[in-house]
Amino acid sequence: GGIITQTPKFLIGQEGQKLTLKCQQNFNHDTMYWYRQDSGKGLRLIYYSITENDLQKGDLSEGYDASREKKSSFSLTVTSAQKNEMAVFLCASSMNSNYAEQFFGPGTRLTVL
Amino acid sequence: GDSVTQTEGPVTLSEGTSLTVNCSYETKQYPTLFWYVQYPGEGPQLLFKVPKANEKGSNRGFEATYNKEATSFHLQKASVQESDSAVYYCALGDGPNYNVLYFGSGTKLTVEP
C-alpha cells in the first residue's frame, strides 16, 4: 500500500498572489496528476507527469505551472490567484500502464480573498 | 472531444431501495470506463473499471455494464445502505494519452436510514 500527502490542507491567498501546492506519494508510481474539483463540475485535469522532469498539459493548464522535482513529488503553482478558481485541488498517482487505477490524495482547498 | 454526462444530483434514497446513476459518454475511440467514489473529506477512489465493451464490472454490490451500442455505463445497486452516501463519478480513459481520464460532473448520493 501507499499514501498520497498533500500540503497544505487549506490555502488562503490574496487575488493576484502566486501560490504553491505540494504533493508527495510513496507508491513508487511513475505518473502523477493535478486535478481541480469545482462543485458540480467534476474533476478537470490541470497537468500530469509520466516521469521525473516530464510535464504534460491537461485541459485546464492556463494560469498554472507544475514541477516534477523527483519521482515522489509533484508541485502545482497558481501563477496569479483569482476568485473564480476557488476549488479543491486533488493530486493523484498511478502506474504507467494503460488505464491504470489512479490513487488520490485528500485535496487542498484554495480560498482567494 | 471526449466527454462524460451523468445523472445530476443530488440523489436522496431510503436505505434498502435501489440505485441507478446514469452515465453516457462520447468518444471516437474504444475507451476503458470507470466508476470512482468519493467519501467526505477524502479523494476519489476506484470502485471498478471495465476495459471491454459488453462486459460488466462490479464491487461492493455496485455494478455497471459497458454498453458500446448505447454508449452508456449506468451504475446500479439493488439495495443501498447509509454507508453508500458519497459522490459517484463516471470516467472515461482513452488513447492516445492513455493516462488521461475524463470525469463526469459527479452525482451526490445521500442514503437516509
Image (cartoon, coloured by chain):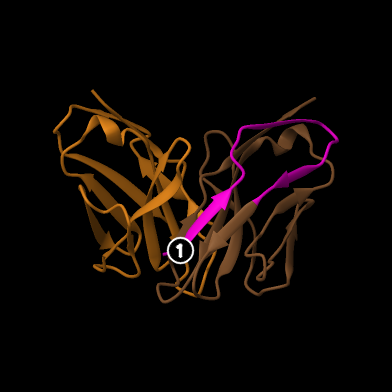
Chain colours: A orange, B brown
Q: Quadrant of the N terminus of chain B?
A: bottom left
Q: Residue at x 61, y 32 (%)?
A: B10
Residue B89 position, x and y percent, is 57, 49
Image height check: is B49 above or below B16?
below
Image height check: is A40 above or below A66?
above
Q: Residue at x 59, y 64 (%)?
A: B33
Q: Residues within 10 Å of mark 1 (few under 14, many from 20)?
A: some
What range is drawn magenta here? Answer: B1-22
Q: Where does label 1 land, which residue?
A: B2
Q: Is residue B78 left or right of residue B53?
A: right
Q: Secondary structure at mark 1?
A: loop
Question: Does the magenta segment cover residue A83?
Answer: no
Residue A4 position, x and y percent, is 45, 50
Q: Residue at x 24, y 67 (%)?
A: A53
Question: Does the magenta segment cover residue B20?
Answer: yes
Residue A71 position, x and y percent, is 33, 64
Q: Is residue A49 visible?
A: yes
Q: Nearer the viewer, residue A60 or A104?
A: A60
Q: Is residue A97 left or right of residue A78?
A: right
Q: Nearer the viewer, residue A97 or B102?
A: B102
Number of marks present in the image shown:
1
Q: Nearer the viewer, residue A63 or A49?
A: A63
Q: Is residue A98 left or right of residue B18?
A: left
Residue B18 position, x and y percent, is 82, 41
Image height check: is A113 above or below A62?
above
Q: Is residue A27 visible?
A: no
Image height check: is B25 above or below A3?
below
Q: Quadrant of the C terminus of chain B?
A: top right
Q: Amino acid at mark 1?
A: Asp
Quadrant in the rendering for residue A61: bottom left
Chain identity of mark 1: B
Q: Residue furthest front?
A: B70
